[in-house]
Amino acid sequence: METVKLTIDDKKIEAPKGSTVYQAAKLLGIDVPTLCYMHLHDMNIENKPGGCRICVVEVQGRRNLAPACSTKCEPGMVVKTHTTRVLNARTTVMEFLLSDHPKDCLVCPKSGSCDLQDMAHRLGIREIPGQEYAEVSTYRKDTSPSLVRDLDKCIMCRRCETMCNEVQTVGALSAFNRGFMAAVGPAFEQNIEHSSCTYCGQCVAVCPTGALTEVNHVPHVLKALADPSKTVIVQTAPAVRAALGEEFGIEPGTLVTGKMAAALRALGFDYVFDTDFAADLTIMEEGTELLDRLSRHLNGDKTARIPILTSCCPGWVNFFEYYYPDMKDVPSTAKSPQQMFGAIAKSYFAEKKGIDRNDLVVVSIMPCLAKKYECQRDEFAVNGNQDVDFSISTRELAAFIKQANIDLKTLADEDFDAPLGESTGAGVIFGTTGGVIEAACRTAYEIFTGKKLERIDFTELRGMEGVRSATLDFNGTPIKIGIAHGLGNARKLLDEVKSGKSDFSAIEVMACPGGCIGGGGQPLHHGDSKILKARAAALYQEDRQKPLRKSHENPFITKLYEEYLGKPGSEKAHHLLHTHYFDRKEQILVKK
Ligand code: SF4
């Protein structure tokens, strides 16, 4: 049999002469998406008009994209099947097809086995351009920086209301109107952005329809990746690696850290970094602040605000800014790891690489929907250029990987890039309830006592009870720690602080039940605590496997301070790594 040698997605193949690129890719196990193409093997019938253009690929040396189903293999051909240019072209083709298609999918006889619908899902299409205008009479949509509420899709199950009001005590969602106009949302005629919503996303995690979803940042990321003038870097939050695999049928609690790094590189990111690096940095700043306040308090300084509250969860920040604005000097002023990363990336890293910050795009992969809002806050930008440009959730990343036809399961593990990808075990456990304060205590103990911490695991801070406390012995000084996850639980501790009854030295609060492992952007866990516990166990496993487990031992953090920041709490560190808080109700009124 005569053959043709060519390369597809960097893999060499000898395909039978006369094969199409689609057939050769298939021999390599590469699944190029198709719509109009059909092959009925046993009947020897093949339909390959190359008409729909969904199967387009990039062929080196050709200006135009080529349909894989009807392009013949040629000797020496070099083909790429899932570049950002190809993905963008497929999306555009699909949007055209959908714009001209009836939208009765719920009751269509083909629903559930419709190739068009499956393809739209595979390509991550969430909106059909022009649809809003075509259906203006009934279309009721409310978009905020993090969440989208589509009132037409609300079936009044009121699951979201239970999460928002009973679990989180946020009070942003309630039923209004009657009959056909009935829906759940902020009080009549108010939208999410101008309500008490914290963007924790727990409503999205339980909504049985598409009435509540996250704002999709993937198209923006795709556009940036396709722009040769931009350097696009990515950071991944700790909780993502413990849950991403679930979207690919991998057992909950399986770490996919190395596969995730490999997938991000395959998607085209120029540098793959880790938010855990910034978590270590957070500990340096927050720990310094804790020790400063603690020492002053122990020396009788009445102005020292104790307990200190953690500030790395933007859902929690939104909550206290709305409900407890008179206490906004109590939380730590340290920025969240996402924002510390962005600030360092667009200053230290950009300067080191000689990249103008306007040409550097920072993308974050987060378990969290509140991070989308957080990165758009005015104070986290320099001359209108955000420190973090786009934030996509774990679910969005999974969809993006599938869209690019990357098989996560079979990827070989890869490492993060240096220097912003290097972290200790302390940074990893940020992703679960109790982890932030445990990481802080590992460092604070050694600095406060001047002694080496022998027992690194503060197991007394771990667990899944909604409100927990433990007293640690800092060489004879008792340090009482409080922990709350879920905003309803946080409210209990905060009310105690407000009334002066709290005797805690420090309190960790995470807005989502379980902490970030149960974030609103994670694969849906349907309230199954076994899944949350498995994810937490995975993070503790990664922590144990790390050669360094205390943030202040991270040599790349030490270097960052030596080369750039000075010391923790310095003026430069304050300028780049700390923030301030607002009275959110007042701010909403001004913005309205
Ligand atoms: Fe986001 Fe984590 Fe806070 Fe949830 S707990 S709002 S996922 S930072």
Image (tube, rainbow, N blue to C red):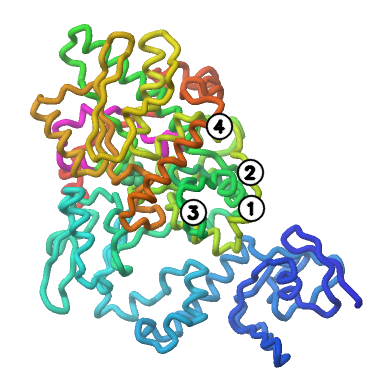
Q: CA distance from mark 1 to mark 4?
A: 21 Å
Q: CA distance from mark 1 to mark 2?
A: 9 Å
Q: Which residue is mark 2?
A: 414
Toward the right, the furthest residue is: 2
Q: In this rendering, which labeled residue sits more in front, label 1 or label 4?
A: 1
For marks 4 and 3 on the same chain, the one whose residue lies earlier in the sequence: 3
For marks 1 and 4 on the same chain, the one whose residue lies earlier in the sequence: 1
In front of the other: 87 or 586: 87
Amino acid type assigned to the residue bearing label 4 in the image: Glu
Q: In this rendering, which labeled residue sits more in front, label 1 or label 3?
A: 3
SS state under label 4: loop
* Label 2 Cα neighbours within 10 Å, binned few <14 / some 14-19 / many ≥20: some
At 42% from the left and 46% from the top, the residue drawn is 534
Q: Which residue is mark 4?
A: 422
The x, y position of residue 246, in whole percent, is 47, 56
Q: CA distance from mark 2 to mark 4?
A: 13 Å
In the shown orientation, is residue 461 left or right of residue 469?
right
SS state under label 2: loop
Magenta segment boundaries in residue numbering = 319-343
Can residue 348 be found in the magenta stretch?
Answer: no
415 up-or-down from 209: above or below: above
